[in-house]
Amino acid sequence: MKRKGFTLIELMIVVAIIAILASIAIPQYKKFQLKAKTSEAKSNIGAIRSAEETYAAENDAYMQAGWAPKNVPGAAPDPWGGDTSGFNKIGFRPAGNVYYRYGVAQGSSWTNPSDGSQVTATASTDIIIMAEGDLDEDDDHGAFYATDEDPKVTDSNPGEF
């Protein structure tokens, strides 16, 4: 008499294959999720740049803005806060909580929070708009910046995600 069905060995092999595939797929999926969250920084830098250009057209000067939120957000988004006075003056306020903190500095260079190196733009740059976050909480911060001269958002720590 022949039995129909799978043996215990066959089922164990299938479970082992699924476990191996999951161990490969899950880290890649998490990395993909973190990379998707970087779009917040790029989008908000663009919005801040636009608000700064509007403010400068009306007031003949750009507005500096300190870091908001004050601390670098981690894996969970932080509420908007910190030094928001400059952002309030240009009319920028993000919707909801943020995964990055933002700042606007005058001048053509700033210190990259990721590695302490100097980021230098062109001599005609008036402001640098910055974003800094630590989505995976590994103390290797992701940072992005753009200037009033160049709308392209640059990743100052490209290996992070």
Image (tube, rainbow, N blue to C red):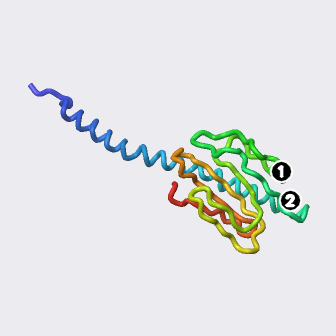
Q: Amino acid at mark 1?
A: Gly
Among the 4 quarters of the image, the one containing residue 119: bottom right
Where is residue 83 shown, x and y percent of the image? 77, 46
Mark 2: give few (<14), some (14-19) or many (20+) Cα within 10 Å: some
Q: Position of residue 61 (x, y in %)?
A: 86, 63
Residue type, numbered disc 2? Tyr
User: For the residue labelled by badge 1, is the local secondary structure a helix, a strand or a loop?
Assistant: loop
Q: Is residue 147 above or below residue 77?
A: below
Question: Looking at the rendering, which quadrant does residue 104 occupy?
Answer: bottom right
User: Which residue is pictured at 53% across the width and 52% down the height?
Assistant: 140
Cβ atoms under marks 1 and 2 closer than 8 Å? yes
Q: What residue is shown at x 85% (from left), y 51% (from top)? A: 89
At horizontal 71% and vertical 69% (from top left) the residue drawn is 150
Mark 1 and mark 2: span between their CA atoms? 9 Å
Left or right: residue 5 versus residue 126 is left
At a point 80% along the width and 57% down the height, the residue shown is 64
As drawn, the label of residue 46 is: none
Work out which quarter of the rendered image holds the N terminus and state it: top left
Q: Residue furthest top?
A: 1
Q: Residues within 10 Å of mark 1 (few under 14, many from 20)?
A: some
Number of callouts: 2
Q: Mark 2 — residue?
A: 55
Pointer 1: what residue? 91
Q: Is residue 46 left or right of residue 77?
A: right
Q: Of label 1 and label 2, which has the lower sequence position?
A: 2
